[in-house]
Amino acid sequence: MLALKILLTIFLSIFVMFVGLLYKGIDRKIAARLQARFGPPIIQPFYDVIKLLQKENIVPENAVPWIFNGAPWLALLASISLFFYQPMGSLPPLLGDRGDIILIIYIFTVAAIAIVAGGFASGSPFATVGAQREMVLLMSYEFPLATAIIALAWYYSKTFPDLPSFSLYTYVLKPIWSNLGVLGVFGALLILIAILVVTPAELGKIPFDIAEAETEIAEGVMVEYSGKNYALFYIADGVKTIGMTALIVNLFFPWNLSSILGISGMGAYILDFLFFWIKVLVLLTFSVTLVRVAFARLKVDQIASLYWFPLLLTSMVGLLLMVCDKLV
């Protein structure tokens, strides 16, 4: 059993890295088309990684080498481990009995802290400014995100007291929309909006890419990275992107096709697995690709104000409506 889990872990790690790069290519292609450009081929991220792995890995003279070289590995391993705790279609999570939503949120934070650590350790003033901006961003969106997660967990703890309310698999087995009243539906919609607005910031995408901001601070935290280290951050970004969208799919859109079409057995697992990744791609297009094409980069103070006031208020109103839905 242990050997099987190790094999599945290795297979899943390779698979999510492949899908992360593939979806990164699709994201770039769609963005280019929306901007009336032809854009690079969908497999361009694979070419980029191969090219980066063949280049020299340069460590700046003023860097702290063990942190500078360790940060990309930490970011990649944290991003991959997100999928050990996430159901995919009708497949339960690989380590479903050892994790919950709180753990997944912490893993996202670890990946962000790895970027901050790498930026500070590089010794570059541009990277230091980028790392400081990444910390401000992290502190800004964590509060509304935590409020949204607590609202969902509280509702599940009251609706299904026999099931673990922080387990992601509970949200797949009992889809939230089928258990809400009118007030609860409006509350859940506000919670969904809050998490969708947090998503581009969590992933460092436009309009929240202040940590890199190539026109201002020359790629910021990434300015000193090259070769293998930059390739690891590049892959980690792709995996983290699909990890965040997969989390939203599991929380709010967990339905499977097999139950609708009356399919069972191995065919059901395969169909639901494929449908799960289609949902991730569609959500990625709407929550990340379209947003970064449509909006310009915000300033640091604008981002902090957005998350600490209107979005936090949105999450709290969503929590209040779900409480009223359950108690009234």
Image (cartoon, rainbow, N blue to C red):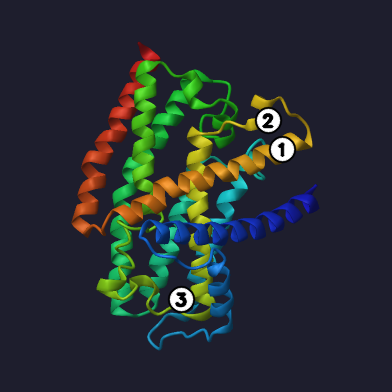
Q: For mark 3, give the secondary structure.
A: helix
Report the residue at 55% width, 62% height from top: 21
The amino acid beneath tag 1 is: Tyr
Contact (CB < 8 A) between labels 2 and 1?
Answer: yes
Residue that numbered label 2 is attached to: 258
Which is in the foreground here, disc 3 or disc 2?
2
Image vertical order of residue 87 relative to residue 113, above or below? above
Mark 2 nearby-residue class (10 Å; few <14, some 14–19, many ≥20): some
**In this rendering, would 189 be left or right of 169?**
left
- Across and down, in percent, residue 278 comes to 57, 44
- The image quarter containing residue 300 is bottom left
Residue that numbered label 3 is attached to: 68
**In this rendering, would 195 be left or right of 125?**
right
Distance from Cα at disc 3 to Cα at disc 2: 46 Å
Residue that numbered label 1 is attached to: 269
Report the residue at 35% width, 26% height from top: 187
